[in-house]
Amino acid sequence: MSDVEMIALQEKVAHLTRVVEDLSDVVAGHAKTLDIAERRIEALMRRAAESELDAGGTVPLADQRPPHW
């Protein structure tokens, strides 16, 4: 393998390494965003269930078994 080919391969490896690091950062950011969204959704679902119970409603449908069980 010539020096030119070796340098070209090293450049490709360096570029791909950088791309992988950048994508890893993006994935980590998305994971944080999803965690926050999941916590907010859970809080909203709890609030909605509490509001329904406070208003004289029954057990939230998500917590009830389907009628065919």
Image (spheres, helix red, strand yellow):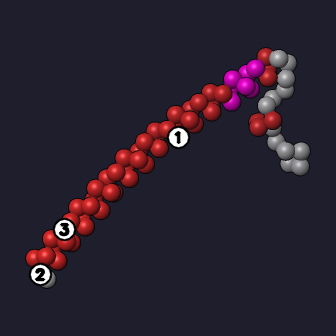
Instruction: Locate the N terminus and report the quarter of the image it occupies.
Output: bottom left
N-term-proximal mark, 3 vs 2: 2
Seen as rendered, the residue at the extreme front is 4
For the residue marked with disc 3, what is the amino acid?
Gln
Amino acid at dot 1: Leu
Left or right: where 34 falls relative to 17:
right
Residue 23 tag number: none
Q: Closer to the camera, 26 or 35?
A: 26
Circle 1 Cα neighbour tier, 10 Å, few/some/many (<14 / 14–19 / ≥20)? few
At horizontal 82% and vertical 42% (from top left) the residue drawn is 65
**Disc 3 from disc 2: Cα separation:** 12 Å
* Drawn side of residue 36 relative to residue 62, left or right: left
Q: Which label's residue is closer to the chain start, 3 or 1?
A: 3
Along the line of sight, which residue is nearer the eye, 26 or 28? 26
Q: Which residue is mark 3?
A: 10
Q: Position of residue 66 (x, y in %)?
A: 85, 44
Q: Which residue is mark 1?
A: 34
Q: Is residue 47 magenta?
A: yes
What number is the disc on residue 2?
Answer: 2
